Amino acid sequence: MVMRFFLCCLLLLGVVEARAAEVRVVATTGMIADLVRRVGGERVEVVQLMGAGVDPHLYKATTRDAAALLRADVIFYSGLKLEGRMTEVLAKLGGAGRAVYAVTEAMDREQLLAPAAFEGHYDPHVWFDVSLWAQTVPVMVRGLSAVDAAGAEQYARRGAELQLELEALHAWVQAEVSQIPPKNRVLITSHDAFNYFGRAYGLRVVGLQGVSTVSEAALGDVASLVDFIRAQGVRAIFVESTVNPEAMRRVAKDAGVRIGGELFSDAMGAPGEMRFGWDTGTYEGMVRANVETVVEALK
Ligand SMILES: [Zn+2]
């Protein structure tokens, strides 16, 4: 009887083994991991290095991450120096049967923002312009197809479907933001993560910290932001899920303005973390939750 039970277990394991995914993928951020899962379906197994609340600018790879990276067939990272300390390591992992892609690599540089404060680098927060982030899908399709030719057709089909969904999401964000009276379209947040969002959907964006979170906000920045909020009659300001909210709370108190809510900036929510009925553990859900938070507070 016991023997039969073991045999049964072995058979079951065999079945599970046979159905295991073909391609081992590592993605740095959730915004990438979610899209790769959508493109890859059952053929891929995606390990996501940075979870909810994790700041990619400051992130350092753990021993566990290193093991996952070395096991991977394909690695997708954001690029444009988003993964500050990891960028060099990631770029060097290619070769020896492993493909490495910065998902932003195919983006037309003319479409990227290069703020003066970022000293010649591009602003890496491209995922908040949904139409721009949709350009990462073909890179994912190409990357998966390169290591799994048998799945190429499926990746192309699923990628095309996803791009259509993202186009619809882009149009939805435009329609939502248009509900905010033009004079209220000012988005004040902890750090400069929303410049692409502002450009794509017509909001003026002011961040307390610079493009990266590496430098902390100086006292002078707080004072000038308070002046700006008072002068403009700003209705609400926002804290971010990956940045300590203390400085923004001080700004809110000094300026006599309310905190309009928490925005997901450089990381999505945890899987199943619902806000306004959206699962913020998905790219689409994160975008929708952010937009609803902003529109609710500013309209
Ligand atoms: Zn950032």
Image: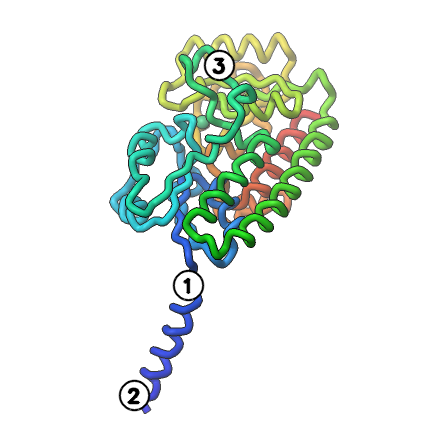
Sequence-wise, the earlier of marks 3 and 2 is: 2
Query: What residue does disc 1 label?
Result: 20
Residue 128 left/right relative to 173: left
Sequence-wise, the earlier of marks 1 and 3 is: 1
Report the residue at 59% width, 29% height from top: 129
Report the residue at 59% width, 28% height from top: 260
Ligand 1's quadrant is top left
- Marks 3 and 2, how far apart in space? 68 Å
Name above or below for residue 90 compared with residue 229. Answer: below
- Marks 1 and 3, how far apart in space? 45 Å
Label 2 CB-ligand 1 distance < 8 A: no
Query: What residue does disc 2 label?
Result: 3
Can you give x and y, in whole percent of width and height, for residue 112 in the image? 52, 21
Point out the frontmost of discs 1 and 3: 1
Residue 96 left/right relative to 162: left
- Marks 1 and 2, how far apart in space? 26 Å
Name the residue type under label 3. Answer: Pro
Sequence-wise, the earlier of marks 1 and 2 is: 2
Query: What residue does disc 3 label?
Result: 115
